[in-house]
Image (cartoon, rainbow, N blue to C red):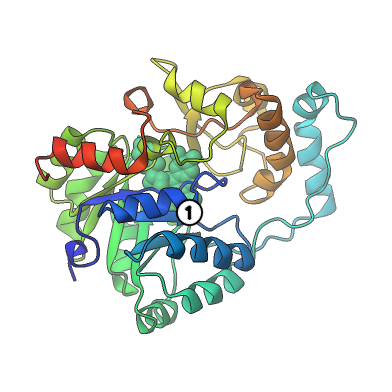
């Protein structure tokens, strides 16, 4: 099946976890003929159902629900206490006397998966891991088009083998978390336009290119390189309907040549964002911090408090290397602008 038979225009608004994708944003993109995505990884099944209902109130076009394929961890008390101590310079700088232990480390993926099957969106995409063939079969039975996120060729072949309909080839430029699930995250180093031809040559299913794609010329280059569509995260993060706070948005829109860095200090998994004081404070412990989602859950109250205070030096300022070329406007207008730039409208 081609992507064009699922949604007309070759643009996917990247899912952006953290509450940034509003149902209004997802619907605006889908109504414009591209594919809107809702990041569901941090949402309970109840919230996924509620937000999907809101999307459906705004659009009857196809949209995508996106998930992290993950297992709930069970860290030792000692490991958690050690991780809290490593974070002490950060939480004491907020005036706190202790860091709370989260009530849960992450949402239950099995429960999210059952909610997904029942909701039957046109498309579901996955990152951080891979499904098994039986899970893909159940999604297909529910009429859902299945997309896996990959950062190198072996991962693309693995998704193709388990029956996925397409893969997102995410290059090193990408904003937010790296999706690597085979081998070390540090070893998945190919840039978007190095990765794309290798994946296109390796698999028969459609390839979607992601990472640093900001303008029509980037989309054209990806399509000419064999991609059937692109996924754009940072570009839509600054759209009017996105729920990022004003301080974060301001940092993105004034990023200029401020460097983005890959860091695991916020979440325990490598992710790209604007370099800030938090990353520098935690740099010495970066290699020993607990893995995702433990570190992510521990830093969650810190990031939430920093967000409330507009303290961008302690927030995760996720974005891709193309951030300086981000253009704030309504999401539908961005789709329209991009289509005009690639000569499609
Ligand atoms: C703030 C932020 C959050 C993200 N959250 C998710 C997510 O929940 N699931 C996912 O598959 N990708 C996620 N991504 C990746 C994007 O969907 C997209 O693939 C990536 O941003 C592409 O690179 P670009 O930012 O250079 O456009 C996130 C990216 C950002 C910037």
Location of residue 89 in the rendering, given as x and y in whole percent from the top left corner: 78, 24
Taking the image as shown, residue 57 lies to the left or right of residue 170, namely right
**Among all residues in the image, which is located at the extreme top?**
257
Quadrant housing residue 219: top left
On screen, residue 202 above or below 300 = below
Location of residue 147 in the rendering, given as x and y in whole percent from the top left corner: 34, 63
Between residues 150 and 248, which one lies in front from this camera angle? 248
**Residue occupying image coordinates x 36% and y 32%:** 329
Quadrant housing residue 62: bottom left
Between residues 241 and 86, which one lies in front from this camera angle? 241
Location of residue 166 in the rendering, given as x and y in whole percent from the top left corner: 27, 63
**Residue occupying image coordinates x 36% and y 22%:** 324
**Among all residues in the image, which is located at the extreme front?**
57
Q: What crowding class fits label 1: few (fewer than 14 Cα within 10 Å), some (14-19), or many (20 or more)?
A: many
**Residue occupying image coordinates x 36% and y 50%:** 28
Q: Mark 1 CB in 8 Å range of ligand 1?
A: no
Which quadrant would the N terminus be assigned to in this image?
bottom left
Numbered marks: total: 1
In what element is the residue under mark 1?
helix
Which quadrant would the C terminus be assigned to in this image?
top left
Q: Which residue is mark 1?
A: 23
Taking the image as shown, residue 16 lies to the left or right of residue 27, namely right
């Amino acid at each position: 099946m081609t992507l064009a038979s699922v949604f007309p225009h070759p643009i996917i608004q990247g899912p952006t976890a953290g509450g940034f994708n509003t149902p209004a944003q997802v619907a605006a993109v889908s109504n414009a003929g591209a594919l809107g995505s809702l990041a569901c990884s941090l949402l309970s099944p109840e919230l996924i159902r509620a937000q999907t209902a809101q999307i459906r109130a705004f659009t009857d076009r196809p949209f995508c629900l996106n998930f992290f394929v993950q297992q709930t961890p069970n860290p030792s008390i000692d490991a958690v206490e050690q991780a809290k101590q490593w974070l002490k310079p950060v939480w004491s700088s907020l005036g706190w006397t202790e860091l709370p232990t989260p009530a849960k480390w992450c949402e239950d993926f099995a429960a999210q998966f059952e909610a997904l099957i029942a909701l039957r969106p046109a498309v579901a995409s996955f990152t951080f891991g891979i499904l098994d063939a039986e899970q893909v079969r159940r999604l297909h039975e529910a009429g859902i088009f299945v997309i896996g996120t990959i950062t190198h060729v072996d991962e693309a072949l693995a998704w193709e083998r388990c029956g996925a309909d397409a893969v997102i080839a995410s290059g090193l430029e990408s904003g937010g978390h790296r999706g690597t699930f085979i081998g070390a995250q540090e070893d998945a180093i190919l840039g978007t336009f190095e990765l794309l031809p290798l994946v296109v040559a390796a698999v028969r299913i459609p390839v979607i290119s992601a990472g640093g794609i900001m303008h029509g010329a980037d989309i054209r280059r990806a399509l000419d390189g064999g991609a059937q569509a692109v996924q754009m995260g940072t570009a839509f993060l600054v759209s009017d309907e996105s729920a990022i706070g004003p301080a974060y948005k301001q940092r993105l829109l004034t990023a200029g040549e401020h460097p983005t860095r890959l860091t695991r200090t916020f979440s325990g998994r490598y992710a790209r964002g604007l370099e800030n004081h938090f990353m520098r404070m935690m740099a010495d412990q970066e290699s020993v911090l607990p893995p995702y989602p433990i570190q992510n859950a521990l830093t969650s109250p810190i990031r939430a408090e920093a967000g409330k205070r507009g303290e961008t030096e302690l927030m995760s300022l996720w974005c891709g290397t193309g951030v300086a070329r981000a253009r704030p406007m309504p999401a539908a207008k961005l789709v329209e602008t991009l289509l005009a730039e690639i000569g499609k409208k």
